Image (cartoon, rainbow, N blue to C red):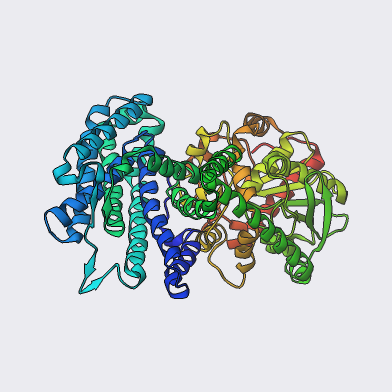
Amino acid sequence: MRYSPSFARSSGLIPVLVVLAVLALVPLLSSSMYLRHLLVLAFVFGIVASSWDLSLGYGGLFNFAHVALFTIGTYAFGLVGQTLGLSPWLGIAFAGVAAGLVAALITLPILRLSGIYIILVTIAASQVLYQIIISQSDITGGTSGMVSLPALELFGYRFNRGGKVGYYYLALLMLVASTIILYKITRSRFGRAIVAMRDHKYYAISRGMSETRTRLFTLTVSAALSGVAGGFYGSYMRVASPDNFGLGLLGLLLSMLLLGGAGTIWGPILAAFFVTMVSEVFAAYGAWRNIIMSLLLIVILIFYPGGLWALLQTLREALDVVRSQATARLRRRFGLGQREAMTGAHETMVATRHGRIAVADTGGDKPALLLIHGNSSAKEVFANQFKALRDRYRVISFDLPGHGVSDNADPEKDYSVEAFADVAEDVLKALGAANPFVFGWSLGGYIAIELAARGYPVRALAVSGTPPLRVVPEDVGRAYDATSHFVLASKTFLSPAESRDFAASTTGPKTVETIHLHRAVRRTDGRARAYTLGKLQIVDWPRQMRFLRSTAVPFAILNGSNDPFLNHQYFRDLKLEQWTGEPDDIQDGKHAPFLLKPAIFNEKLVAFLRAAETTSRHGADVVA
């Protein structure tokens, strides 16, 4: 499903606010006019590069006339502000309109073209625009360009006074406004149409999308934003030069787009700052500056094809891994007594094939009952079962790798349903708990089924919130109702708001009883979410389904009657042989009936386990 939260609820809100606060304070903390000048150029180039990203990165349209449209905006400002003598503010607005209209005209001959043909046509169009500009020397100044363009003024305040602080803040405001517009577009139905036309053109057309309208919208909006930036640039630099039609500016802005990461919006803005500042560092090297910048661009793109944005995400992931691992170690060291009091079980660390795992075990020689928790949770979610069932069973649960107080692990080999089933085997072997009863919740249900389907001896098997799958991804769409929860379950990074939403949807609102589960979501290694769900297609689902249809192992499904994430009809249509004949729904149990309705759940689970024990003693098959 499509998940598009507001920016205020995203993980980018706080970093962006911090950066904006720093940029807003620069003129107040530094008197360097040159630093302000470089930042103004970065703001302008950020607008042009990110708006170009809308057509090239998101739209897949290789529009090499984008820089020419930026220059058209500069000349449009000069014509209105200088030649016609109208308000410079009107000139900036007209610059956007002029660039948009020219882009619309360029769109017409490329409506049925693609690839290199669009490149050729747009390069030719930029050359035509260049020839028009230099040929109308009476108006445009020809090869000399237009000079002494009017400065901006508002309520008697001239923006070019006081070190051009007014231009600085206006450029920053324009960058913010441009980014908001692009952000809104890329997350709107127009944005989805743009990407669909890029990725699956004919499928998008078959679904009723208009290629003409989509391309026209993409190029026009992209050009209009660039044109406005061009108008501002003309007022700031006070010159409109035909040199901007050349390869120099084109190469600079294209390097920002590619270096930042196409199809990201944020990447080109980041690269605009990076290229502007780094190139200035090497300014003393003369001609070597361009060589150094080119080599730097090549190196970054070789190791990070996604550009600086991909590099930033890699660094962010590395920091999150350190944070989540440190959290696990601190809680393991200082929260042991609280966790053991919560479950009434002894906690120990067990070495497995996939790292050190925290295990809670009530001990004794009673029949073993293994409880496996779900995605971004922890073993303490079963606190009610530990206390209620310990007199009859040896209750065991463990924190999955990257969860609770277990160690983080290698995402490539340790975060998958199969690897988690390996962990369950190793834990049971280390504890000497043979032939256990097994209950799995949500993701834990798939782990439990995988454990049994691979041939590990279990006495009985029960799941909750876990629709058995036959083929992925088709059955995922049938078994689950499309909700943002399913998307959050696979996200590497969760914002504080998303973390609260995810925890509340699985285990209920934050209360004294559930606060530790909300904290478990924040502690979880985000790679465990992304990698585990990303590997669902390689799980041997047919083997799991064959096991459930043919096994003599007693099986039960104990769902909440109002689980918001499940298509309950899907369970009934499977017609699996199980303890009750069909899923035994628990009234108002939602996604975690064992937590929200523990008394009813425990009663049903114990009844199922007793029936399984009786059947096992008599050596009879269990038939639902």
Q: Quadrant of the N terminus?
A: top left
- The x and y percentages for residue 266 are 45, 51
Q: Residue at x 70, y 53 (%)?
A: 402
Residue at image coords 83%, 57%: 349
Quadrant for the C terminus, please: top right
Q: Is residue 292 left or right of residue 155?
A: right
Please determine whether, in this image, residue 22 is positioned above or below residue 619: below
Residue in view at x 58 percent, y 56 percent:
592
Q: Nearer the viewer, residue 300 or 57?
A: 300
Q: Residue at x 76, y 47 (%)?
A: 437
Asked if residue 463 can be seen in this view, the reply is no
Could you tell whether 469 is left or right of 483 in the image?
A: right
Looking at the image, which is closer to me, 611 or 78?
A: 78
Residue found at the far left of this picture: 84
Measured as percent of width and height from the top left, residue 531 is found at 62, 43
Q: Position of residue 564 (x, y in %)?
A: 48, 52
Vertical order, 28 against 452 (above or below): below
Total number of numbered labels? 0
Give the percent coordinates (x, y) of residue 289.
53, 46
